[in-house]
Structures are given as structure tokens and as C-alpha cells.
Amino acid sequence: MTQQALAERPGFGAPESFEIVAQSAPEILAHVETVVCVPTFRRPDMLERTLRSLAAQRGAGPFAVIVVENEGKERAGAERACALFAEGLFEGLVIVEPRQGNCKAYNAAWRCALTRLPALRQIAGIDDDEEAEPGWLAAFLQAAASAPAELFGGSVTPRFEDPTRAWLGAHPIFRSHYSASGPIPMLYSSANYLIRREVLETLGFPYLDESFDFTGGGDSDFFRRAMAAGFRFWWVQEAVQRETMPARRTEADWVRARGYRNGAISARIERRSRPGTAGRLRVLAKSLALLAASPLRGLMLGLDTRSLTIGLYHAQVALGRLGTEFGVADEQYRVPEKN
């Protein structure tokens, strides 16, 4: 699709919200077929580890990187990325999206990719608290070359800064949804993904609904819309990333809040796909059914993991779903320092 055709698509008429602070020469970007997008917010040291893990990729061929800084004042991530770019660590672009919000950052990165890389075929992603195994991107590209799908997800292995809390790795909030390569119903997280260009062109800009910026769930909503549009999903177990889990994310209140948040997101997205009174009643009925089933499900999960903390997860999800019926919005990302 030409740049003019892109500009004529719904949403692209609005001015770009991001600023480009570093970029490779146009003749280099002109031939790039794969780009890895890296959103970052106040984690320059972690970002550097992420970018160095991308520089260590093997067997993937040439690819570009788009770093999108989502902190518009201090810009520590952009400063670090620009320094690494100047050293020749990667080709691509460093941009700044000053409007804080996870969905805004993704929208900026994906829009930048589609408008600056004319030969683009696919977009992959990694967060700034993750590191890619050396064969990560090659595994994605190998699957994308043959699998009958347009959206791909990969596994994320938690790495706990406090090793005494590693038992939390059995908790559903720290586990990948799938464990074997092959077709899957849908993806739920943008922590580790590869998306064909045609998915973004079909769904249109803005790709992620920015009303999910501080609650999370914009990625799940995007994937559900992609599924409704007829696109197919594939799991690539060999596309492995490691995610750093700081001590804060192992504290009881954070783990509990994440369970409530997951429930709230699921109910909110289901209501969007089932509008009207009848749809809302169906979502409410499902929430009540999940609450009723949570004691038995929680007992089974707790016995399986030998943890009361983990066993409470199903009840937290059900309560989070019900909370949305009363207007409760768990904006876990509103205050980054607490996340």
C-alpha cells in the first residue's frame, strides 16, 4: 500500500502525535520487511538489555527496530536508545510519543512502521522489561513463512529478581496462555507477538483503543477484533522471551490487583462484543457463574500449586468482573511507580 493510500485510510488524516528523534537513512529503511517495536517508559537500563538482546538475534536476517519513548519530559529511554543507535547497535527509528498511555505508544510505533517502511511485511514486539532469546525472531519468521495464520504469539518466561518468590511462576498471571506450537483460538497479550501487515491495514488506525491506556486490555481487545475480522492465530513456543519481575510485582497487593484487573478486562471486552441489555445480562450471568465456581476451581488450583495465594486467583477474576458492573475501573497503570 502506498503512503498516499495509507494517509487516506480512516484515522490517518489526523496529524502524527509522535516525534522522530533518530532514524536510519531512508535507503536502509526502504528494504526492511520486518520491524521490532519496543515501547519504553522510565526503564533505560532494562531497555538497553532489551536492545542488546535484539542485537544478538541469530538466523533472522536483517530487521529494523522502532523504540517508542512514552515519557515526554525526561526521555531517559529515548536518550539511551539514541546513544545505542549512534553506536550502531541497531537500525531503525527512535520516536517519542509524549501522550502517556500503553495503547498510545503501540499506536505510534505501528503507525510509524507502516508509514516509514514501504517494504514492511510484519511487525514483532517486545517490552522494555523483556529480553529475547537469540533464536526468538528467527522462530517467529520461520512460522510466519509457512503457518496458515496472520497473528503469532510466543512464550514469556518470568525471571524473578527475588529468587525466594520464584514459586509465583506457577500463578496464572505469570504463565503464558499456551505451551505448544500450533493453531490457537486467540492471543490475549502483546508481550510477545508478530503481526502481519495486512491485519493492521484491515483493522485501521488507531489500532488499539486508547480508552484502555491505564487499565490494560487494549491488546486483548485488538486481538478479539482481529479474530472477528477472520484473521487466524498461531502459537510459536520456540519464540522465547524472558521477562524481569521486580520485587514489587511479587507483593501480595500487586498480585491481587492483577487478578481483579484481568477479570475487569475480560468483562469489559465481552460487553463490547455483546452490546445491549441482553448482552449485558449474559456477561453478568457469566460473572456470577464464575464466582459460584471459584471456590472449587480455586481449591483445585491451590492444591495443584500448593499455594493459597495462587488458589485465590479465580475468585479475584470473578470479583473483578463483577466490579465493572458497578463502574469500578482498576487503572493499574495510572501510577507507573506502583506497577
Image (cartoon, rainbow, N blue to C red):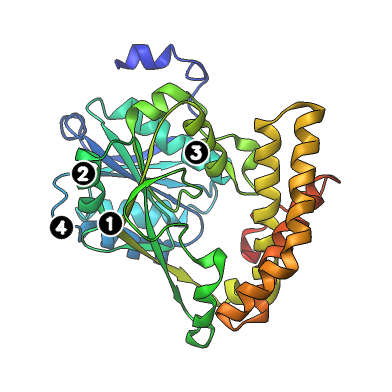
Q: Quarter of the image for the N terminus: give it.
A: top left
- Horizontal side, residue 40 vs residue 323: left or right: left
Badge 2 crowding class, 10 Å Cα cut-off, few under 14, some 14 to 19, many 20 or more, is: many
The amino acid type of the residue labelled 1 equals Leu
Q: Nearer the viewer, residue 39 or 216?
A: 216
Alpha carbon of mark 4 to alpha carbon of mark 1: how far?
Answer: 19 Å
Tell me what residue is drawn at x 65 percent, y 62 percent. 258
Residue at the disc numbered 3: 223
Circle nearer the N terminus (4, 1): 4
Q: Which mark is residue 58?
A: 4
Q: Which mark is residue 63?
A: 2
Q: Nearer the viewer, residue 123 or 145?
A: 145
Q: Quadrant of residue 19?
A: top left
The amino acid type of the residue labelled 2 equals Phe
Asked if one can make out residue 328 in the rendered structure from this viewpoint, the answer is yes
Alpha carbon of mark 3 to alpha carbon of mark 1: how far?
Answer: 32 Å
Residue at the disc numbered 1: 84
Of circles 3 and 1, the one toward us is 3
The amino acid type of the residue labelled 4 equals Arg
Q: Quadrant of residue 249?
A: bottom right
Instruction: Look at the numbered disc 3 and give the secondary structure of its residue.
Output: helix
Circle nearer the N terminus (4, 2): 4
Q: Nearer the viewer, residue 159 or 87?
A: 159
The amino acid type of the residue labelled 3 equals Phe
Alpha carbon of mark 4 to alpha carbon of mark 2: how far?
Answer: 11 Å
Residue found farthest to the bottom: 164
Tell me what residue is drawn at x 34 percent, y 54 percent. 81
Instruction: Look at the numbered disc 2 and give the secondary structure of its residue.
Output: loop
Instruction: Look at the numbered disc 4 and give the secondary structure of its residue.
Output: loop
Badge 1 crowding class, 10 Å Cα cut-off, few under 14, some 14 to 19, many 20 or more, is: some
Residue 143 is situated, as x and y percent measured from the top left of the image, at: 24, 45
Residue 61 is situated, as x and y percent measured from the top left of the image, at: 13, 47
